[in-house]
Image (cartoon, rainbow, N blue to C red):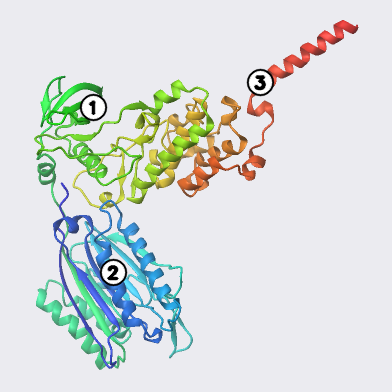
Amino acid sequence: MHLASQLEVTAAQATEAGLKAQNEDCIGLRIPDQHLLTMKGITAVIADGVSAAEAGKEASETCVRNFISDYYTTPDAWSVKTAGQKILDALNRWLYSQSHSQGHKRGYVSTFSTLILKSQQGYLFHVGDTRIYRLRDGELICLTRDHSTSIDEQTTYLARAMGMDNRLEVDFKNFDLEEGDIFLLSTDGVHDFLPEKILQGMVRSLVGKAQHEFDHVSHQLIEQALKNGSNDNLSCQIIRVDKLPDANNQEVYKRLSQLKFPPPLEIGQSLDGMKVLKELHASQRSQIYLVENESDKTRYIMKTPSLNYEDDPAYIERFVLEQWIGRRVDSPYVVKVVNPDRPKTALYTLMEYVEGQTLTQWIKENPKPDINEVIRIVELVSRGLRVLHRRDVLHQDIKPDNIILNREGIPKIIDFGACYAAGVEEIDTPFEREAALGTADYSAPETRFRSNKTKKSDLFSLAVVTYEMLTGKHPYGEDLAKLKDQRQLSRLNYQSAQIHNPMVPVWMDGALEKALAPYSGHRHQALSEFIYDLQTPNHKYRKKNFQPLIERNPLRFWQVVAAIEAVAIILILKFS
């Protein structure tokens, strides 16, 4: 990976049972090696098992141990938010099921707070009354809020915790990091018995101090809380950000340029044992060749970068990420990126060769397609997209040219050149990344104007492709490609698919209109909903989208009117 984190911290942690016989708090900290440090970051977790729930110790230990182990095994392409939320949802369901399984009478309930430091960003997930503080410029502020309800001055109840309810509501925040930031994570046995001024003073004393001072202060916090009357378990963690990634352009470019750009290849030439059989496509940005492995005669597709961008790190990163993403996706409906059988001597991407035709060619050859065949193809493409989405990757360039139908009629999504991988985008670079834009005729408006792009953006593109398969046209004509800013979205008027193909059922037209809504909030919530609406007649769309013939097919309407008028004239002349 060309990205390498230089994140450095000083950290310490301490935990004690205090006056209680058993310590139901649990803490964990992981500072991983280089690859995981870059892709996942540093994780600190603190949990306080609820003693009234009887299985609080097991609950807190499960939360800390499993969150840390699971977080570092999630896909590299996942964002911190996606990874954290999925793990916590699964943990919460397990704890809740343990508490309510047949024969169990013990509750598995725990508070939970975690701080994740990745690249130049901090992330926190929080539920309960454990806390995360930050000291910056001498000021200590609490970044979390207690999920508790006070009955009176002496009685407080937790309103939210892990395992308390089958549905989990977690607070999530992310924020910029600064060198010198000091974070304190603590359980209520510590912060409830130390005035904020004392907390601030003790944490502030660590500015510029060495590791042994962190160890000393973490234990001092516990000792002081005990002196102040703490009757609970006591735990704390202290983390200082010593160095943030600040690699310069030369360092990153050096890593990106470890493999040279190959020259334009001629038919018959070989590169790393791959013989060029044919040039399939060439553009300003890349060349695509059909190649054959000289050792076993297996055919592949080779994509090489354009020499025009040999000194452009943003371009090279996007080219490198294309193969990085492709290697992490395994689906029969997505083209496979393969590793050559010998070390690379140049920069290129090698992909499986799919014999067949593009969806563009299929549309030309099927001007009056079988609607069931259209639905079959679109449903299979959606399966490939869902595999990408589960990796927290958006394709961003779904169009007929990027879908190939093999000889068995199975579609495969190709070309990862415009993909957005959330986990990679979180990692800072010293250069401005290329804005990955798809084709204007197929891209959702929000991807064009750098709004909040989501899985619904790929849904929009797939709906445009579906519309084109059914009609040979585009739902907004040329207006979508001509959009210049978001203010023009209201001018987009959906053209009913029935205007171009009267065989399209009303309910299917309604499903398309919803999926193609200019504002993403008006679209289906998921690809599966869109596919279901294509396959299943929905009376809601029947009623909403019923249109008279003049609106559905004006030409046909006026032809009928003219025919009626002609008959009427003939009758008048005959009997006059």
Whether residue 368 sits left or right of residue 309 in the image: it is right
First of labels 1, 2 by sequence position: 2
Q: Can residue 523 be seen here?
A: no
Dot 3, crowdedness within 10 Å: few (<14), some or many (≥20)? Answer: some
Q: Residue at x 12, y 26 (%)?
A: 263
**Residue 45, image x and y in percent?**
27, 71
Residue 176 drawn above or below residue 14 = above
**Mark 1 vs mark 3: which is more N-terminal?**
1
Give the camera-side residue of 193 and 6.
Answer: 6
State whether residue 484 is above or below residue 230: above
Q: Residue at x 21, y 26 (%)?
A: 289
- Whether 332 is drawn above or below 262: the answer is below
Is residue 525 in view from this perspective?
Answer: yes
Which circle marks residue 556 in the picture? 3
The amino acid at mark 2 is Asn
Q: Are marks 1 and 3 in contact (CB under 8 Å)?
A: no
Tell me which numbered mark, 3 or 2, is placed earlier along the sequence: 2
Residue tagged by mark 2? 66
Q: Amino acid at mark 1?
A: Ile
Residue at mark 1 to residue at mark 2: CA–CA distance: 45 Å
